Amino acid sequence: MLENTILVVSSIIGISLLLNLWRFMKGPHMVDRIIALDTMYINAIALIVLLGIFMGSPLYYEGALLIAMLGFVSTSAACKYILRGDIIE
Amino acid sequence: MNILDILTMIFLLIGAAFLLVGSIGLFRLPDFYMRLHAPTKASTLGIGSILVASIIFYSFKGDGLSIKEFLITLFIFLTAPITAHMLSKAVLHVRQEPRPDTLNIEILEDIRNRK
């Protein structure tokens, strides 16, 4: 029963990732693409946590934490680039 | 099937629903100022719910209370508002226009000129 629920939840998150990908490709401006990428990071964290529950191993937690940190850093770097035209001044 | 599996499933489904709502908002809403709302609020709650499900699943699987997923939750809850703030500053900087029927649109120029 838990396995079936995990499959259903994974497909819902896959649909969310497809919607984000559509916005990432279409987005009229660069900020739309940045926010689509940020949401894709969050959905990818959810997918990795689900994979960890499905496999029954707590080892995937480090990957999720790494993706969370990289997502925040890359989003703020891209925002900084738009704001200043430069990342490290 | 015990009560903990049922709790895990309920939290997983709630989290997936919120993530889907956030992504649909990002997909459908008409301009960026509205689009900023959906992922930064709904997706944060969705990932928090999925991590709560993970905490419940691992805590009763054997080796005691597992709160390291709480670290991811804390990190995302801290960084999502910062990300939203930086994105809104960026979109004010690039002067993307909102929809013309937005309420109180006349204060936008004041906000843009504020340092």
Image (cartoon, coloured by chain):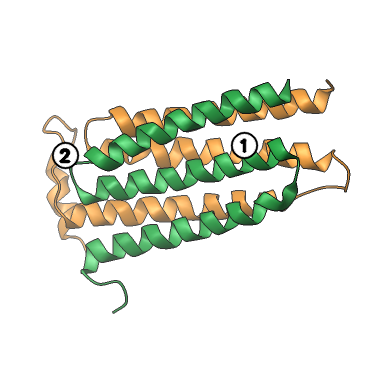
Chain colours: A green, B orange
Q: Amino acid at mark 2?
A: Pro
**CA distance for labels 2 and 1:** 33 Å
For label 1, the residue is B50
Can you say whether A5 is above or below A61 in the image? above
> Between tags 2 and 1, which lies in front?
1
Q: How many C-alpha atoms fall within 10 Å of the one at disc 2: few (<14), some, or many (≥20)?
A: some
Residue lying at the far front of the rendered structure = A55
Front-most of residues A53 and B93: A53
Q: Secondary structure at mark 1?
A: helix
Q: Amino acid at mark 1?
A: Ile
Sequence order check: which comes first, mark 2 or mark 1? Answer: 1
Front-most of residues B19 and A54: A54
Quarter location, residue B25: top left
Residue at image location 57% in from the left, 31% down from the top: B15
For the C terminus of chain A, the quadrant is bottom left
Residue at image location 69% in from the left, 35% down from the top: A54
- Contact (Cβ within 8 Å) of mark 2 with mark 1: no
For label 2, the residue is B98
Do circles 2 and 1 both sit on a common chain? yes
Circle number at residue A86? none
Residue at image location 62% in from the left, 36% down from the top: B50
Quarter location, residue B59: top right
